Image (cartoon, grey):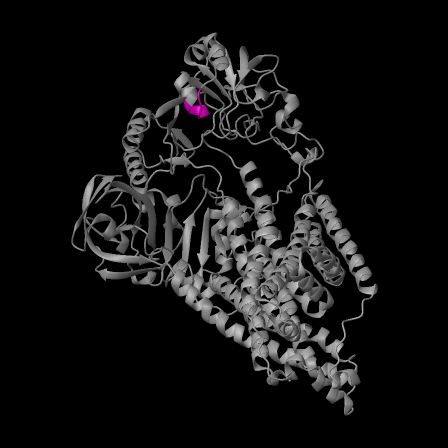
Amino acid sequence: MAGQSPGRSALIALLVAIPVLGMVGITTVTASNVATPAERVELELGSTEARVQIVAAPHPKLTQDPLNQGNWGYSDEAGRVDAVQSIEPMPVAAASLFADGTRLLSIRSTPVVVETKDGLASFPAVQGQPWDPAFAGKYDVTAGSAPTSDDEIMVTAAALDRLGAQIGSTAAFTAPQARSFTIVGTIQSATLDDSAVGFYGLPGVFDGVLPDDTDLMTEWYLPDTPLTWSQIGDLNPRGATVLSRTVLLDPPPVGSYTFDGGFSRSTTNLFVALLGGFALFEVALLAGAAFTVGARTQQRTLATLASVGGDKRMLFRVMSFGGVILGAVGAALGSVLGLAGAWIFMQISANGSAARYPGFHLDVVSLSVIAAFAVLAGWCAAAVPARAAGRIDVLAELRGAQRPPRVTRRRPVAGIVLLAIGAVIALTGGVVELAAYAPVYQVGLANFGIALIVAGPVIMQIGAVFVAPLILRWAARVASRFGPGARLAARDVARNPGRSVPALAAIMSCVFVATVAMSLISTMQLNSTKGYTYGAPLDTASVSLTTSLNEPPYGQVLQTTGPEVVAAVDSSFPSARARLLSSAEDPPTGFGEADTDGTTADAPTFALPRIDADTVCPSDVTRMDADHEDTPTDIRCPTPHYLDTMMNSSMNDHIWVGDLADFAAILGEPVSEKSQKMLAVGGAVATYPQYVVNGEIRIDWITELNSVLEPARSVSLAGSVQEPEHPLPYAVFMLTSTADNAGLDYRPSVVVSSIGKDPTQAEYDHAQGALAAISPGIYLQTETGPQTYGASWTWALLGLTAIIALVTASITIGLARADGHRDNAVLTSLGASPRVRRAFGFWQAVVIVGLGSVIGVLLGRVPSLALSLTRDTAGLSLLPFTPPWLQLALIVVALPAVVAVGGALAAGGNRTRFSNRAAFD
């Protein structure tokens, strides 16, 4: 019977194919983003056998993840006896780990400052032998030849364009060393895209540091020496981690090692599954509407089949098997188009990096599941009309009589029950989520809560489908007051639920998914904004003078090049004026820990502002081994990051010293009159009220981060508060005269400049280049605030929803009109004017799309409302209920209006032409 209506059959197959196309495309692109073991070996190692890196001083308990060299640590298991006996106090040289004569290739990165056609700029550079044939697949020479001397280098193709040079040209470097090199060829790194700028030279040519001098910064490759997992276990206690070709291709059993950094795509898979499930649900509704119309037009054929002995089971099989066939056709078509679309998308979005798409991968299991669900969706779409076909009145259908469906109370009552059950399940899911977050987060319980929150609204949608005929009858009574067109359309919709309800349900499902997505995006945007940590005032560039040491004794060091940094920033951003800020040094990491003899008598003292102990988590204010889980119900726990006394990062000192202009630069706003008066009388100003107790700010000189102990010295200053617009990592400010009178030691530590906008690439390159010329460890950071993706994503979703809803409405209303061609013929025969027909089309769309949109928005808010039940210890929602009201209002109002106008225009030009009674049959 599917072959008797090729147009409708093609429509159903296409409806099934569209979501299959999307899911197959997403699944294939996602799978193609992940390298197979063989592809990863080539990307990471090229043709070499292993990569070795010295990461720490030898330690008997050091171990690593066999598949991720960067995931290493110290195991709680007992160390190897032989390793304990051979521990060296300092990191060892990589060459000492292997037998004499073992071939090693080195790769070491360093920043360089180069003169480009637009001025100085800072770029990454590689020193080693990346052009060696052993690196084929990881590094590939694309033109020219390899360097043979220290004054020759290779570059990426993008570097030639950036320099305005060609092979044979000279590149001038100003840092780390001022010298010139001849470009002899171009090289491509598998992990870099086509726009990446890079420079490649022999070991030590850029910074003068040979690999043996700083093994912690060097990657060593073994071209000819395979390493097994057992051999890696021998190397780990020596301070080395290894990525081995042998282990990547044949990893040890899961669970046999301590560290596991395996990447999980469960979140992505869950998102795709949910999206696909809702898409197939909508397809089943749309295809069900098409099957319903087909069943109504073929009722005389089915009645004839029944009159010659066909029973209900046969009629059901005839109709439902058509759904299976069309579902299979749609699955096959969607799979082919999805694979083709994925390949085209990958070609368009490829950026030259082999790591972007290591290969074209087919996830056979996922594709099979998608195809099976597509066939199931086709069968489900045909099952309801097939079941109804088994209950036809044979005599009535043979003589062409059609009666409106009988109104019963059973379905509305069942729908209301399902709505209630779904609401209870969703709210139960929210309560389960609340329980999962306190007192200790439980992953299994949280996943169960998410499942309930998803299942509840789905059940509510099914209940809404059962209640929809009753709602349509109510809507018909209301719409009958708006003229004959509205009355005819509303009654037609209400009297023919077989074609109206699937259309309404399809719109409802589409709007439901969009509402859920937009609400969750709004919630994530709010949390992202609330949880964002500002490093400086908005639109401010900052440069920390604290740099890291990459050689013994390691740690951090404060540079004394503040004036030079100020000059470099000012030259890069001439419209702004940089300020050199001074601060009192915060305690370093590990401060206050006892010596081997258990004493801290010789420990230095550091100045910190005393915080009101009643405003922070008790564990934070009393001891180093703070554990927020000790007081899970205390609303003060955990302590906010900007007040946490354990946050003793040397880059965020607490006490700042300077003049009023410095304080204004810290705040990102003018200093208030109250603060100016307080500073003028020798007081201090805090950026958080927790530092002011009884009108005073107390500075303690401490030897341990423990408020129970008496400080070595304390000074109390009159204090006030000026809170900045956003939380900033600056606690207390005072004038230099006040700091001198209090005996506070301070030094220049940060340079800030209010640039007022994001820097251009040229300005940024100039600044980075000028700073790198001062010190390779100094970097420019710009504070642009949290990423504001919520509005753009919700508007994009609104547009996508409008497109999908328009297509859905066109299909469903078109099917409804095809089913109601006889009603249209009657209207035409009675002399209905185009105005009446346009009003009929307009109100038909208003009722179907309007009600579908309203129900979809109401049900779509249930998941975010249930998730908002989660609470932190302060009683605030972890996932606040913040739906985008403007976009939701547009869905409810504007979407039905647009569809209704289109329906009116289409109806006005639709004249039914007939020359016999067939138009009425």
- Is 27 in the magenta? no
Where is residue 397 drawn, in percent x and y?
Answer: 75, 83
Residue 465 seen in the figure? yes
Q: Is 351 displayed left or right of 640 in the figure?
A: left
Q: Is 648 displayed left or right of 291 in the figure?
A: left
- Is 666 in the magenta? yes
Where is residue 245 drawn, in percent x and y?
Answer: 44, 62
Indicate whether 556 appears above or below 325. Answer: above
Residue 49 seen in the figure? no
**Picture quarter with the N terminus:** bottom right
Indicate whether 897 appears above or below 569. Answer: below
Where is residue 398 drawn, in percent x and y?
Answer: 75, 86
Indicate whether 450 appears above or below 370. Answer: above
Where is residue 340 drawn, in percent x and y?
Answer: 45, 71
Residue placed furthest toward the bottom: 308
**Picture quarter with the C terminus:** bottom right
Based on the displayed image, in which of its 4 quarters is residue 281 positioned?
bottom right
Based on the displayed image, in which of its 4 quarters is residue 174 positioned?
top left
Q: Nearer the viewer, residue 661 or 622?
A: 661
Q: Nearer the viewer, residue 280 or 367?
A: 280
Based on the displayed image, in which of its 4 quarters is residue 369 positioned?
bottom right
Residue at 33% x, 40% y is: 760
The magenta segment is: 665-670
Residue placed furthest toward the front: 831
- Number of numbered tags placed on the structure image: 0
Q: Nearer the viewer, residue 684 or 723?
A: 723
Residue at 62% x, 25% y is: 621
Q: Is 839 displayed left or right of 548 in the figure?
A: right
Indicate whether 122 appears above or below 259. Answer: above
